[in-house]
Image: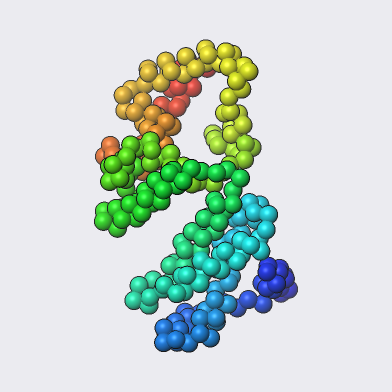
Amino acid sequence: MARHKVEICGVNTANLKVLNNEKMLELFKRYKVGDKIAKEELVNGNLKLVLSILKKYNNRCDNMDDLFQVGCIGLIKAIENFDLSFDVKFSTYAVPMILGEVKRYLRDNSSIRVARSVKDIAYHALMVKEELTNLLNKEPTVKQIADKLGLTEFEVSNALDSMRDTLSISEPIYSDGGDTIYLQDQIEDKNSKMKFIDEKVALKEAINSLKEKEKYIIVERYIIGKTQMELAEEIGISQAQISRLEKTALNNIKNKIS
């Protein structure tokens, strides 16, 4: 079978080797006693892992060479910090570190600048999230993170949202099998603001007409930004039940304003 050559930073990806578990174990043991050649072999033997992570960023970065180098930095950090006693595959440990470096690079080089104070909140929120996840053995809610930081849910949600990747206005955000709704469809035209007052009033009345639990779910999902899993844990029902209640509520709203 033909092997396709793709060059990134002068590296022919078709010639990259992949290490098996036995070889990885041998190299890590050698590296831990100071063998620098073993470290180099570990890096070269895991470059395909970096490339697999970068695939989804092909259309998001003008210079994939730079992004590849950033991914390699994450790989090197993972190699330097990996402990054989972790009892996990190296790839399981390395992927989050590589992704972290890549996302940090894209965020810091984005044309959209986020205030340092908001970045600080997001950083501390992520640290607390990891701490609570380890403590509770499950992902904490935004409220739990906010309480731990002494902040409001909105401040935490806003900070975490600011760290997310930007979207194209042509990004599809909803589809029920019929017409797809795109992000640009939800952007308000200030020049024709008055045209939509009736629709906004109708929407508000439709939401207020919902049952209390349905109304609560819609507000928490679409205004506060909570996930279905967070609501399920908070209310004490399954995620599937949250999904059904949300779908029912949306259908009721649609029927009220149509």
Which of these two is toward me, 180 or 38?
38
Q: Is residue 130 above or below residue 13?
A: above
In the image, is 145 to the left or to the right of 168? left
Image position, residue 28 (x, y; %): 44, 82
Who's the residue at 59% across and 34% down the image? 183
Which of these two is toward me, 157 or 137?
157
Image position, residue 164 (x, y; %): 50, 46
In the image, is 72 to the left or to the right of 157? right
- Confirm whether residue 178 shows in the render: no
Q: Is residue 6 above or below residue 185?
A: below
Q: Is residue 41 above or below residue 248?
A: below
Q: What's the coloring here?
A: rainbow
In the image as oriented, which residue stretches furthest toward the front? 116
- Confirm whether residue 176 shows in the render: yes
Image position, residue 204 (x, y; %): 43, 18
Which of these two is toward me, 201 or 161?
161
Q: How many discs mark residues in the rendered view?
A: 0
Which of these two is toward me, 70 or 132?
70
Who's the residue at 55% across and 81% down the image? 40
In the image, is 93 to the left or to the right of 13? left
Looking at the rendered image, the quarter that the N terminus falls into is: bottom right
Who's the residue at 55% across and 73% down the image? 46
Who's the residue at 26% across and 56% down the image? 135
In which image quadrant can residue 86 be found? bottom left
In which image quadrant can residue 50 be found? bottom right
Image position, residue 103 (x, y; %): 53, 55
